[in-house]
Amino acid sequence: MICVRRRKFGIPYHIHWFDPSPQFHVWPLTIFYQSPGKEAHSGLVRQAFYTLHSDLSVGADGYLAAMNSSTRNQVHQMIRQGLLGTKVGVNEFTEFHNGFATDKAIAGTSVQKLKSLGESVWLTAAVWQNRALAMHATVVDHETKRARSLLSASARFEEPEDRKLIGKANRWLHWWDMCQLHEAGIGLYDWGGVAKDATAGEKLGINQFKEGFGGIPVEESHYYPVFLKSWGD
Protein backbone atom coordinates (compact mmCIF):
# COMPACT_ATOMS: atom_id res chain seq x y z
CA MET A 1 0.00 0.00 0.00
CA ILE A 2 1.09 3.57 -0.68
CA CYS A 3 -0.01 6.47 1.54
CA VAL A 4 0.09 9.94 -0.02
CA ARG A 5 -0.40 13.04 2.13
CA ARG A 6 -2.00 16.10 0.56
CA ARG A 7 -3.89 19.27 1.45
CA LYS A 8 -6.87 20.98 -0.16
CA PHE A 9 -8.32 24.29 1.00
CA GLY A 10 -5.83 23.98 3.88
CA ILE A 11 -7.33 20.68 5.01
CA PRO A 12 -4.99 17.66 5.18
CA TYR A 13 -6.17 14.38 3.70
CA HIS A 14 -4.64 11.06 2.70
CA ILE A 15 -4.80 8.93 -0.43
CA HIS A 16 -4.23 5.19 -0.02
CA TRP A 17 -3.30 3.26 -3.15
CA PHE A 18 -4.07 -0.49 -3.30
CA ASP A 19 -5.24 -0.75 0.33
CA PRO A 20 -6.98 -4.14 0.79
CA SER A 21 -8.82 -3.00 3.94
CA PRO A 22 -10.36 0.46 3.45
CA GLN A 23 -11.97 2.05 6.50
CA PHE A 24 -13.63 5.41 7.09
CA HIS A 25 -11.32 7.77 8.98
CA VAL A 26 -12.63 10.89 10.68
CA TRP A 27 -9.08 12.28 10.75
CA PRO A 28 -7.23 12.40 8.54
CA LEU A 29 -9.88 12.05 5.87
CA THR A 30 -8.84 9.29 3.49
CA ILE A 31 -9.56 8.38 -0.14
CA PHE A 32 -8.83 4.82 -1.27
CA TYR A 33 -7.74 4.18 -4.86
CA GLN A 34 -7.92 0.74 -6.45
CA SER A 35 -8.68 -1.38 -3.46
CA PRO A 36 -8.84 -4.98 -4.73
CA GLY A 37 -12.19 -5.77 -3.05
CA LYS A 38 -15.73 -4.77 -4.00
CA GLU A 39 -17.39 -4.83 -0.58
CA ALA A 40 -19.43 -2.00 0.94
CA HIS A 41 -17.70 -0.13 3.79
CA SER A 42 -19.48 2.03 6.34
CA GLY A 43 -18.99 5.76 5.77
CA LEU A 44 -17.50 5.24 2.29
CA VAL A 45 -18.97 5.44 -1.20
CA ARG A 46 -17.72 2.83 -3.67
CA GLN A 47 -16.94 3.64 -7.29
CA ALA A 48 -16.14 0.74 -9.63
CA PHE A 49 -12.80 1.05 -11.41
CA TYR A 50 -12.03 -1.02 -14.50
CA THR A 51 -8.49 -1.65 -15.65
CA LEU A 52 -6.11 -4.16 -17.23
CA HIS A 53 -3.34 -6.11 -15.50
CA SER A 54 -0.18 -7.49 -17.13
CA ASP A 55 1.93 -10.18 -15.45
CA LEU A 56 5.52 -8.95 -15.26
CA SER A 57 6.95 -12.33 -14.25
CA VAL A 58 7.01 -13.48 -17.90
CA GLY A 59 9.83 -11.07 -18.81
CA ALA A 60 10.60 -8.95 -21.88
CA ASP A 61 9.87 -11.62 -24.49
CA GLY A 62 6.68 -12.57 -22.68
CA TYR A 63 5.44 -8.98 -22.83
CA LEU A 64 6.01 -8.99 -26.60
CA ALA A 65 4.26 -12.35 -27.01
CA ALA A 66 1.17 -11.05 -25.18
CA MET A 67 0.78 -8.06 -27.54
CA ASN A 68 -1.37 -8.06 -30.64
CA SER A 69 0.58 -8.09 -33.90
CA SER A 70 0.29 -4.34 -34.55
CA THR A 71 1.57 -3.34 -31.10
CA ARG A 72 4.35 -5.94 -31.21
CA ASN A 73 5.52 -4.81 -34.66
CA GLN A 74 5.64 -1.17 -33.56
CA VAL A 75 7.68 -2.01 -30.46
CA HIS A 76 10.07 -4.11 -32.56
CA GLN A 77 10.50 -1.19 -34.97
CA MET A 78 11.50 1.09 -32.11
CA ILE A 79 13.90 -1.50 -30.70
CA ARG A 80 15.62 -1.69 -34.10
CA GLN A 81 15.61 2.10 -34.41
CA GLY A 82 17.62 2.39 -31.20
CA LEU A 83 15.20 4.29 -28.97
CA LEU A 84 16.61 5.00 -25.51
CA GLY A 85 14.78 4.85 -22.20
CA THR A 86 15.78 7.02 -19.25
CA LYS A 87 14.57 8.35 -15.92
CA VAL A 88 13.70 12.07 -15.82
CA GLY A 89 13.27 14.61 -13.04
CA VAL A 90 10.04 16.02 -11.66
CA ASN A 91 10.46 19.48 -13.21
CA GLU A 92 11.28 18.10 -16.66
CA PHE A 93 8.35 15.71 -16.57
CA THR A 94 5.90 18.36 -15.36
CA GLU A 95 6.86 20.80 -18.12
CA PHE A 96 6.60 18.09 -20.79
CA HIS A 97 3.31 16.70 -19.52
CA ASN A 98 1.64 20.08 -19.07
CA GLY A 99 2.53 21.12 -22.61
CA PHE A 100 0.85 17.94 -23.83
CA ALA A 101 -2.13 18.54 -21.52
CA THR A 102 -2.62 22.07 -22.84
CA ASP A 103 -2.67 20.82 -26.43
CA LYS A 104 -5.15 18.07 -25.53
CA ALA A 105 -7.31 20.32 -23.28
CA ILE A 106 -6.96 17.92 -20.34
CA ALA A 107 -5.90 18.45 -16.73
CA GLY A 108 -2.20 18.94 -16.08
CA THR A 109 -0.14 17.97 -13.07
CA SER A 110 2.19 19.83 -10.71
CA VAL A 111 5.61 19.39 -9.18
CA GLN A 112 4.01 19.40 -5.75
CA LYS A 113 1.55 16.65 -6.64
CA LEU A 114 4.25 14.41 -8.09
CA LYS A 115 6.59 15.03 -5.17
CA SER A 116 3.81 13.99 -2.77
CA LEU A 117 4.27 10.45 -4.14
CA GLY A 118 7.88 10.46 -2.96
CA GLU A 119 9.89 7.40 -4.00
CA SER A 120 6.67 5.72 -5.18
CA VAL A 121 6.62 7.45 -8.57
CA TRP A 122 8.86 6.62 -11.52
CA LEU A 123 9.23 9.23 -14.27
CA THR A 124 10.58 7.89 -17.56
CA ALA A 125 11.11 9.06 -21.13
CA ALA A 126 11.63 7.56 -24.58
CA VAL A 127 14.40 9.54 -26.28
CA TRP A 128 15.38 9.57 -29.95
CA GLN A 129 17.98 11.86 -31.51
CA ASN A 130 18.29 13.70 -28.18
CA ARG A 131 14.59 14.53 -28.05
CA ALA A 132 11.98 13.09 -25.70
CA LEU A 133 9.13 11.60 -27.71
CA ALA A 134 7.05 10.28 -24.80
CA MET A 135 7.09 10.38 -21.00
CA HIS A 136 5.34 8.27 -18.37
CA ALA A 137 4.65 8.62 -14.66
CA THR A 138 4.16 5.27 -12.93
CA VAL A 139 3.07 4.62 -9.34
CA VAL A 140 5.22 1.84 -7.87
CA ASP A 141 4.27 -0.05 -4.70
CA HIS A 142 7.23 -2.14 -3.55
CA GLU A 143 5.17 -3.63 -0.72
CA THR A 144 2.55 -5.25 -2.98
CA LYS A 145 4.98 -5.57 -5.95
CA ARG A 146 2.58 -3.63 -8.12
CA ALA A 147 2.97 -0.73 -10.55
CA ARG A 148 0.27 1.45 -12.08
CA SER A 149 0.43 3.71 -15.13
CA LEU A 150 -0.50 7.16 -13.82
CA LEU A 151 0.28 9.74 -16.53
CA SER A 152 1.34 9.48 -20.15
CA ALA A 153 2.36 12.34 -22.42
CA SER A 154 3.68 12.61 -25.96
CA ALA A 155 5.64 15.21 -27.89
CA ARG A 156 3.59 17.24 -30.35
CA PHE A 157 4.49 17.24 -34.05
CA GLU A 158 2.49 18.40 -37.05
CA GLU A 159 3.69 15.98 -39.73
CA PRO A 160 1.80 12.66 -40.02
CA GLU A 161 5.02 10.62 -40.08
CA ASP A 162 6.20 12.30 -36.89
CA ARG A 163 2.90 11.49 -35.19
CA LYS A 164 3.26 7.83 -36.18
CA LEU A 165 6.76 7.78 -34.70
CA ILE A 166 5.49 9.23 -31.42
CA GLY A 167 2.74 6.62 -31.18
CA LYS A 168 5.29 3.86 -31.65
CA ALA A 169 7.61 5.46 -29.09
CA ASN A 170 4.80 5.60 -26.54
CA ARG A 171 4.14 1.86 -26.99
CA TRP A 172 7.84 1.10 -26.77
CA LEU A 173 8.13 3.11 -23.55
CA HIS A 174 5.41 1.02 -21.88
CA TRP A 175 7.37 -2.11 -22.85
CA TRP A 176 10.61 -0.58 -21.55
CA ASP A 177 8.91 0.49 -18.30
CA MET A 178 7.67 -3.07 -17.81
CA CYS A 179 11.18 -4.43 -18.31
CA GLN A 180 12.66 -1.98 -15.78
CA LEU A 181 9.91 -2.70 -13.24
CA HIS A 182 10.48 -6.44 -13.58
CA GLU A 183 14.19 -5.95 -12.88
CA ALA A 184 13.20 -3.99 -9.74
CA GLY A 185 11.15 -6.93 -8.46
CA ILE A 186 7.68 -5.68 -9.43
CA GLY A 187 5.29 -8.44 -10.50
CA LEU A 188 2.21 -6.63 -11.84
CA TYR A 189 1.69 -3.76 -14.29
CA ASP A 190 -1.67 -1.98 -14.08
CA TRP A 191 -2.66 -0.03 -17.18
CA GLY A 192 -4.29 2.78 -15.22
CA GLY A 193 -7.90 2.23 -16.15
CA VAL A 194 -10.12 1.61 -19.16
CA ALA A 195 -13.44 3.18 -20.06
CA LYS A 196 -16.21 0.65 -19.45
CA ASP A 197 -18.39 0.00 -22.53
CA ALA A 198 -16.71 2.68 -24.69
CA THR A 199 -17.91 2.28 -28.28
CA ALA A 200 -16.50 5.30 -30.10
CA GLY A 201 -14.22 8.32 -29.91
CA GLU A 202 -11.04 8.93 -27.97
CA LYS A 203 -11.99 6.69 -25.05
CA LEU A 204 -12.36 3.71 -27.36
CA GLY A 205 -9.00 4.54 -28.95
CA ILE A 206 -7.29 4.63 -25.55
CA ASN A 207 -8.91 1.32 -24.62
CA GLN A 208 -7.67 -0.28 -27.83
CA PHE A 209 -4.17 1.10 -27.27
CA LYS A 210 -3.99 -0.51 -23.83
CA GLU A 211 -5.71 -3.74 -24.89
CA GLY A 212 -3.02 -4.14 -27.56
CA PHE A 213 -0.60 -5.19 -24.82
CA GLY A 214 -2.72 -8.19 -23.84
CA GLY A 215 -3.61 -7.35 -20.24
CA ILE A 216 -6.33 -9.14 -18.29
CA PRO A 217 -9.53 -7.14 -17.49
CA VAL A 218 -10.01 -6.48 -13.77
CA GLU A 219 -12.63 -4.62 -11.69
CA GLU A 220 -11.42 -2.88 -8.53
CA SER A 221 -12.78 -0.14 -6.26
CA HIS A 222 -12.26 3.49 -5.37
CA TYR A 223 -13.72 4.44 -1.98
CA TYR A 224 -14.49 8.02 -0.92
CA PRO A 225 -15.94 9.61 2.19
CA VAL A 226 -19.29 10.91 0.88
CA PHE A 227 -18.35 14.59 1.03
CA LEU A 228 -14.86 14.08 -0.46
CA LYS A 229 -15.67 12.42 -3.76
CA SER A 230 -15.11 15.64 -5.70
CA TRP A 231 -11.54 15.76 -4.35
CA GLY A 232 -10.50 12.60 -6.16
CA ASP A 233 -7.81 13.01 -8.80
Image: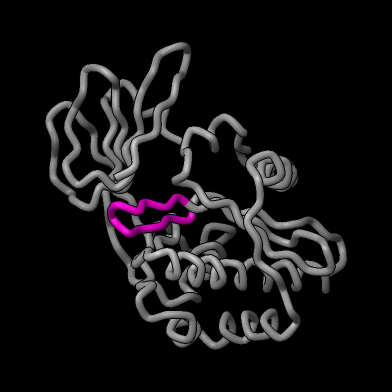
Q: Position of residue 127 (x, y in %)?
A: 74, 65
Q: Which quadrant of the structure image shows residue 56?
A: bottom left
Left or right placement of residue 149 versus residue 135 in this view:
left
Q: Where is residue 67 in the image (x, y as percent from the top left)?
A: 48, 82
Q: Which residue is drawn at 50% across and 50% down?
A: 150
Which secondary structure class fits the magenta region best? Answer: strand
Q: Which quadrant of the structure image shows residue 146?
A: bottom left
Q: Which residue is drawn at 58% across and 51% down?
A: 123
Q: Quadrant of the N terminus?
A: top left
Q: Which quadrant of the structure image shows residue 66?
A: bottom left
Q: In this view, does 55 lie above or below 100?
A: below
Left or right placement of residue 41 versus residue 75 in this view:
left
Left or right placement of residue 1 versus residue 21 in this view:
right
Q: Where is residue 82 in the image (x, y as percent from the top left)?
A: 74, 79
Q: Residue at x 45, y 20 (%)?
A: 7
Near-viewer residue (197 or 187): 187
Is residue 147 rendered magenta in the image? Answer: yes
Outermost residue to the front: 184
| Segment tinted magenta in the rendering | 139-149
Outermost residue to the top: 10
